[in-house]
Image (cartoon, grey):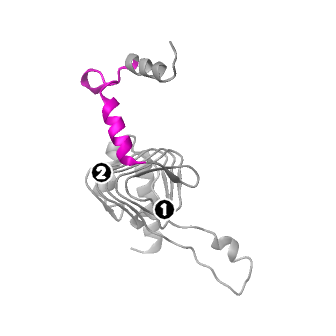
Amino acid sequence: MNEGRNMKYHLYTKLRIFLIRSALTRTKYLVKNNIFASVGENFFFQPRIIPQDPKLIKFHNNVAVASGVKFINHDVVQKVFNNIDSEKIFNKKYSCIEVMDNVFIGTNAIIMGGVRIGENVIVAAGAVVTKDVEPNSIVGGVPAKVIGKFSDLYEKRFESTFETIGEHEHVDADLCWEDFYKKHNID
């Protein structure tokens, strides 16, 4: 495929993915069409925008990516560097990203290139991950730092999950508000 046709195909694919309203349908499309370098079992991808170079990203098993997450696997700093000294030529830098088993990446997190997110990890909403994340951790902040343990949240969440779920797994709003007021010492 020539470069012009390849670019049109790439733009068409990105537009098509953006227009798929359902995150489940979008995820199925991404997997079926091998958009990423690899995708394991039980994968969920909510963002409507895919990275510029998705073949540089691997997802292992049981990975959920919330809305607005960005994977940055290249930079454009060469645009600045190339204007400093005309005798030096800088190229765009590309880096791979790997997400291991049992990982949740929260809304609007940014995952920078060259990062490996270990097994059993939660990346908090809005975090900026600039370096590898160790297994069994929860990271948050800018830049992301360890703020907890995956295993602790797993146990804590298991203990409280059934308190707010009503019949047929629908959220029981009354139970949620009761729990909220209890935690905030409000009568």
Residue at numbered disc 2: 62
How busy is the neighbourhood of tag 2: few (under 14 within 10 Å), some, or many (20 plus)?
some
Secondary structure at numbered mark 2: loop
Q: Amino acid at mark 2?
A: Asn
Point out the residue furthest to the bottom here. Answer: 87
Point out the residue furthest to the right here. Answer: 84
Picture coordinates of residue 54, whole percent (x, y): 42, 62
Does 67 appear above or below 171? Answer: below
Q: Amino acid at mark 1?
A: Gln
x 41%, y 51%: residue = 16
Could you tell which of marks 2 and 1 lies nearer the N-terminus?
1
Secondary structure at numbered mark 1: loop
Residue at numbered disc 1: 52
* Span colored in magenta: 149-173
Picture coordinates of residue 31, whole percent (x, y): 30, 55
x 25%, y 54%: residue = 41
x 54%, y 73%: residue = 93
Q: How many marks?
A: 2
Assess whether mark 1 and mark 2 are in contact (beta carbons under 8 angstroms): no
As drawn, is 134 to the left or to the right of 74?
left
Picture coordinates of residue 2, whole percent (x, y): 43, 75
- How would you classify the magenta stretch by its main secondary structure? helix
Where, quadrant-wise, is the N terminus in this rendering?
A: bottom left
Does 100 appear above or below 178? Answer: below
155 in the magenta segment: yes
